[in-house]
Amino acid sequence: MFLAFALLCVSGVFAQEKEGKEEKENIGTETVNVVKPYKATVSDAFKIREVPAAEDSVLLQKKEINYSIFSVPVASTFVPAKGKVAGIGKKKREYLYDTYLSLGLGNYSTALLDFYTSAEISKDQSFDIGLNHHSAQGQLDETELDTKFFDTKLEAAYKNAGRFYRWGVNGGLQHQIYNWYGLPAQAGFDEAVINSIDEKQTYYTASLGGNIEAVEESVFTGAELSLKRFWDAHDSGENRVVLNPSFRFPVGEELITAHVFADYVGGEFKYEYYTGEKSKYSNLLLGVNPNLVIAGEDYTINLGASVFYGMDIENDDNDFYIYPKVNASYRLVEEYVTIYGGVEGGLDQNSYYDFVQDNVYVAPALMGVTPTDRQYDAYVGMKGKLSSNVGYNLKGSYRAENNKPLFRANPVNISGNENHGYVYGNSFGVVYDDVTTFSAFGEIHADIDRNLTLGINAEVFGYNTDNQEEAWNLPIVKGSFFGDYQIDEHWFAGANIFYVGQRKDMYVPEFAGEEQQGEVVKLDSYFDANAHLGYHIDQQWSVFVKANNIANNQYARWMNYPVQGFQILGGITYKFDLWK
């Protein structure tokens, strides 16, 4: 480049000199033939040496080191193998038997039976049978009437897992025997009256049902159908039919689910407690519950509502009901803090069968059965973990219910009803009232390790009634503690303690119409401690012992109904294959 620039400059100078001479002398024309074009070249650039010359005044000479390796030939037998991830030690998988049988006997002539079996007809079909029995023939010393009870339940179910639908049918029979043994001490019945009382009550239940569930995504997601017949030894009976189909509709990128309800209850009581006349009831509830779920990484929102049409067929009284069904949760701190809340409501169907399962000493002479209008149940809470193995749940709620059923002791009503064993103040009726309930709940549960689980919870209640003097037989506080411990491969143990606070009932010495004036009775709070210990002899045989009411508290679950004292029961469990 530099050479080319120089040549151009020289050429320019020569050209100027030539033009000056042309004015003085004409030298003529010349022809120049270019034999080879000019080709510029670039000289090598100056490069810095990779190892610059050292000019240190104190330069040490490197010392030469001579070394050698003492080599010995060794015969190698090493064979390289493919690497693999080290596995976690696993327990040997427990073999599952298709049949289970447990038998137990204890004081108070207590008998316990628990049987279950499952037959696999094919890969997609199975048939299950379950039988449960619990009875006690012993007598409580504190009462003069018979206190024995008997409860047996047989259930069977068929399941079919088809290609497009999973479906099944089920049925059951239940036989229960209880006695109205809770005579009020204040009544002071003489021995002749007590001996004339027929305190026995017998309940029968027959049920049949079915269910279906769609395997693949479709508008119809599933349905349940149940039929139940319930009756007793005093000519009271009830029929119930419940149908619950479910649907799912895509709306944009979201899905709306809709649960449809059809719930019918109808029955009759041969004698109404206060009038002695026959009492009938017939209620049909039709409803739909659409829901839209909006979910994100840290939150879930459920937006919905429940719409019901209630039909009191017996009294020709129909009405519409609309309830909110909104709840949401938000994760504040990973898995440690999640806040949640919601407002929900509904029209809850009541039934004679449900009343009996809550209180077996209810009289078969109710003033009909009415659904509960649960206007709203507002709640807010926080749940999560205190550590990797300790969880918690805190919740506060406020509920408003119209026609809430409350159990209250029946008044003494002997005159003209001597042939009924439940008219001596020893049975319970159901009264309805508008009740608001405030509650605060707390729970902590811990999985100490794979073999030990502990938990404790407590709940406090406050009630406000509209017509009734008290919220009869509802506790102001209740709580429980439980623990399960797998001591080693063979031994296992567990315990549970529950506490029920003070409740209130009413004693009415004599029937004086529906508006009763009586004495409010406070039922003491109580603890009940239970424990069990067992030993696995092998995979099939186990023995166990259970202790209930360890403190031997003679508390009353219901007014004038003391429970059994300390109870001890031992038994054996056997697992085997019946169908293989």
Image (tube, helix red, strand yellow):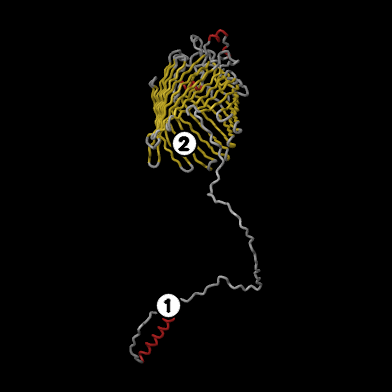
**94 or 233, which lies in front?**
94
The residue indicated by pointer 1 is 40
Mark seen at residue 353 = none
Image point (58%, 14%), residue name:
143
- Residue 392, percent across and down? 56, 36
The residue indicated by pointer 2 is 327
Q: Is residue 408 above or below residue 224?
A: above
Which image quarter: residue 10?
Answer: bottom left
Please tell me whether mark 2 or mark 1 is closer to you in this view: 1
**258 or 99, which lies in front?**
99
18 sits left or right of 561 in the view: left
Residue extending furthest toward the top? 192
Question: Are there few (<14), some (14-19), or many (20+) residues within 10 Å of tag 1?
Answer: few
Image point (57%, 10%), residue name:
189
Q: Provide the secondary structure element on which disc 1 rests.
A: loop
Q: Can residue 542 be seen at all in this image of the molecule? A: yes
Which image quarter: residue 303?
Answer: top left
- Residue 167, percent across and down? 41, 30
